[in-house]
Image (cartoon, helix red, strand yellow):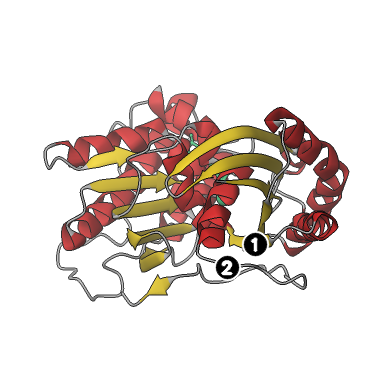
Amino acid sequence: MTRILGIETSCDETSAAVLSGGGDTVALESLVILSQDVHRIFGGVVPEIASRAHLAAIQPVVDRALSEAGAQVDAVAVTNAPGLVGALLVGVSYAKAFAFARGIPVIGVHHMEGHLFATALEHPDAVPPFTALLVSGGHTLLLDVEAWGSYRLLGRTRDDAAGEAFDKVAKLLGLPYPGGPHVERLAAESDAGALRFARPMVRRDQRVGDPDFYDVSFSGLKTAVLNATKAASSDAERGAIARAFQDALIDTLVEKTGRAVRQFGRARVVLGGGVACNRTLVAAMEERFAERGVRVFAPSARLATDNAAMIARAGLFHLERGERSPLDLNAFASQPIPGLVAA
Ligand code: KG4
Ligand code: ZN
């Protein structure tokens, strides 16, 4: 059994967690997440402010996670890509110093691989093989996961990430940042009426192998929303826009995920990333796959958004394979997810 400390500082959450166990049998002993509220004032994450806030928070956040877990750790896992480099460097530097001082190994973790592992922390059956849809503020990835560490990248966004689209639409509708939950709430209490936006990149004649069979694109949808908001004058009209936007985005994600489930014959769909907090998205996935007996797994809000528990879990997997990071481990703004196999 290994006891591992996870550290996550890639964006605007300073998080630390302690996890113990081995293989797919693990126990979460502590999880501390400190969200940096300061960015709300600016309507988006300000990188330098994020780095400084991580620097102020990292020590107390780690201390709290360790004291809640109440025992020493054998290893440290830290997000080292992708993300804001200045923010990542705070966690990476801290993790390396922590590991060096204790003579224990450190392992760098890809943030999106962390999101893949998040759901398994709550659902023991959310393990490979499965189809995965990762939808966050910075990424939209559709993957076929044959085994942990073996990822077939099927599709991604050509422009805006799903969460980014929610945030930009929220801004257009005069809703606060981050916009996802606000758009979801407004959409839930609204009727699209006659308003309907085209489903981006979804056509019947697309076939496996076409570059746009699995990819998504949300910038056109965002422009459609922009034009509709210019013409809108009432709250009801703005509600209809939120609803029509969310319907189009969800339909697109469900269709692309359905194609992957069909092609690879998977019996499980795992959702991850902040947009997986969207109950309407999860319900639409469940409805789509119910009759085929395909199970849909989504993490709770606490594990869907950025957290260190998922980083500890992915780090544990790599440690158990004998991997270690050197003490010159660096931080990278972008990097492909490790373990990619040919699509
Ligand atoms: O994974 P995450 O916490 O951070 C990144 O790694 O980006 O995702 C944050 C994103 C934001 O864009 C936020 O608006 C979106 O997740 N989000 C939602 C909901 N809750 C959070 N989007 C749609 N519906 C929600 N309920
Ligand atoms: Zn994330």
Viewer can see residue 277: yes
User: Can you tell which mark lies on residue 107?
Assistant: 1
- Residue type, mark 2 in image: Glu
> Which mark is drawn over residue 249?
none
Residue 265 in the image: state x and y as whole percent. 17, 57
Q: Quadrant of residue 278?
A: top left
Label 1, residues with CA under 10 Å away: few <14, some 14-19, many ≥20: many
Residue 34 placement (x, y as % from top left): 73, 35
Task: Decide which of 270, 107 is in the foreground and name it.
Answer: 107
Contact flag, marks 1 and 2 (Cβ < 8 Å): yes
Front label number (1 vs 2): 2
Disc 1 to disc 2, C-alpha distance: 7 Å
Q: Position of residue 266 (x, y in %)?
A: 21, 54
- Residue that sits furthest to the front in the current view: 1
- Which image quadrant: the C terminus? bottom left
The residue shown at (49%, 40%) is 26
Q: Quadrant of ligand 1?
A: top right
- Which picture quadrant has residue 36? top right
Q: Is residue 315 above or below residue 71?
A: below
Q: Residue at x 48, y 64 (%)?
A: 159
Q: Nearer the viewer, residue 38 or 338?
A: 338
Vertical order, 297 against 326 (above or below): above
Residue 18 relative to residue 239: left or right: right
* Element on which disc 2 rests: loop
> Which three-letter amino acid code belongs to the residue tagged 1?
Ile
Side (left or right) of 213 relative to 80:
left
- For the question of whether residue 231 can be seen, the reply is no
Q: Position of residue 47 (x, y in %)?
A: 77, 55
Mark 2 lies on residue: 323
